Image (cartoon, rainbow, N blue to C red):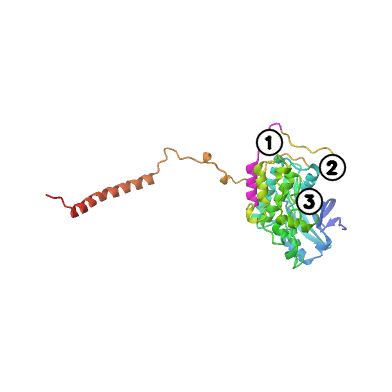
Amino acid sequence: MNTPSLLNQRYQIEAHIASGGMADVYRARDLMLDRTVAIKILRDELSSSATFRERFRQEARSAANLSHPSIVTIHDFGLDNGKLFLVMEYIPGKDLKSILRARGRLPVNEALPLLIQACAGLGYAHSAGLIHCDVKPQNLIVTPDARLKITDFGIARALSATNPDEQARVVWGSPQYFSPEQAAGKVPSPASDVYSLGVVMYEVLTGSLPFNAGSSTELSALHQTAVPMAPRQLNPDIPPILEQIILKVLSKEPSARYRSADQLGRALMSTQRPLPAQSQPVSTPKSPASATAPTISSPVPTYTNDQSSHTSLENSPRPSPLDIDWSTWGLALLALIAVGGLIPLWLWVYFLYFPLQP
């Protein structure tokens, strides 16, 4: 793909960052605002589709309204010389897939803060009515200071609209990470994103995918019917409670999973354990294969936990001995007076029917 050096007379292309199935990503300079940005230039076959361009424009506008620390900000989008492009904030760092390839599985105490941040970003998008549809490690960017950013909101949804008949037969997302309902060709929901994030969790903590196959068709069948190996069989360091969470997220039925990414985030936060005193952040080995992988040092999560469901009785406020409920005492007194006032009436009725014998 021939890439222009200047897009829309505003964005100066500086360097190629990465390539994917649908687009190439470049570092560029916004000449108008004098800032570094990332630009995703889509493949020519996508840019040439009028249906895709219109759906992409809609999805880009929706994604541009998202403002969250765990979501890559969309600055601009457009079409220049037949090339459709998306301008985003530039995030120094590596995608999570590259980190896993370089380092293998991550220790639990390193993985949890990243996963919780992913839950926070997805939960925010879901509350805004947006579904990612393609949650995978390649779309999770990790910065050198261990902040996680979700990218590529809406592109999978736009791709499903390239043909009127596509929605019924196109699998939205990536085969290794799509949910059973996506594998069956059904419309994704927030629960679909939760499942895909569950596959990411499994891979990050075990170093393996829950399902492997030689084709998308085989993977589709496995996602719909197969039971994954218990994570602790691959990594005994995973706490049992965390294993239960992963397996719940990978349930075949959407209703059996967590209702939202927010709920999953709270569940993950409840499993966090403090780092042992002797533990140090795991540094990246100084080898050519891993020299570019960022060091992950358990950042403070950006996800805000709702503690309402975890409040213990010990922490609940207790009434003071001096706090007298006067309304209750008043009602009791009125009841006593009422009962006492009926005694003479009862005596009168009794003696009326049973007079005293002389």
What is the secondary structure assignment of the residue under circle 2? loop
Mark closer to the chain start, 2 or 1: 1
In the picture shown, does residue 19 fall above or below 292?
below
Residue 309: x and y in percent read 57, 46
Image-quadrant location for residue 58: bottom right
In the picture shown, does residue 350 fall above or below 187?
above
In the rendered image, residue 245 lying in the magenta stretch gets the answer: no
Q: Residues within 10 Å of mark 1 (few under 14, many from 20)?
A: few
Q: Nearer the viewer, residue 139 or 310?
A: 310
Q: CA distance from mark 1 to mark 3?
A: 36 Å
- Which stretch appears magenta? 259-278
Residue 128: x and y in percent read 65, 56
Give the amino acid type for the residue marked by disc 2 in the picture.
Answer: Ala
**Which residue in the structure is indicated by mark 3?**
37
Q: Is residue 81 left or right of residue 125?
A: right
**Which residue in the structure is indicated by mark 1?**
275
- Of badges 1 and 3, the one in the foreground is 1
Q: Nearer the viewer, residue 64 or 104?
A: 104
Q: Is residue 328 left or right of residue 255?
A: left
